[in-house]
Image (tube, rainbow, N blue to C red):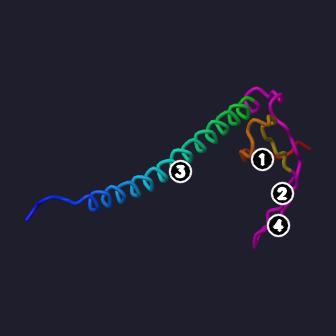
Amino acid sequence: MKRGYTLAEVITALLIIAIGALALFGVLSNALSGIGRVYRELRKTFEANTELEEYFSTGSTVGVEFQFSTLTITSTSLATSIEVKIVKPKSDQFGNTALFIFEPATQ
């Protein structure tokens, strides 16, 4: 009786290993692209925060835009409306980054 593996067994084992490796590479590829998206969003957020900090520390309005809105707060014991100024970075480089600062509008 001979000992060893037949060619069919070796090819089957290699095929199973190849399918597993492809699945693993697919998962790794998705993870790496997700990490890249998170990095880009964090960078945008950091740069937008920098512009907003500059606005609030120096009073410069170069990199921000304003919008006025009415904020209504309602609870069981309190119902009030105040006008607020919405400050957000003006630059289009921030894409869909949601960075809004609400401050009471000056009367």
What amino acid type should be assigned to the residue bearing mark 2? Answer: Leu
Q: Earlier in the sequence, mark 3 or mark 2?
A: 3
Of residues 107 and 11, the one nearer the viewer is: 11
Q: Earlier in the sequence, mark 1 or mark 3?
A: 3
Labels 3 & 2 near each other (Cβ < 8 A): no
- The reply, left or right, for residue 95 in relation to residue 5 is right
Disc assigned to residue 71: 2
Real-space Cα separation, disc 1 to disc 3, in angstroms: 36 Å
Query: Which dot, 1 or 3, sits closer to the camera?
Result: 3
Q: Find residue 77 and report its horizontal and vertical position in percent.
A: 76, 71
Q: Which residue is mark 3?
A: 30
Secondary structure at numbered mark 1: strand
Q: Find residue 42 and report its horizontal and vertical position in percent.
A: 61, 40
Real-space Cα separation, disc 2 to disc 4, in angstroms: 11 Å
Labels 2 & 4 near each other (Cβ < 8 A): no
Q: Earlier in the sequence, mark 4 or mark 1?
A: 4
Crowdedness near tag 1: few (<14), some (14–19) or many (≥20) residues, C-alpha within 10 Å: some
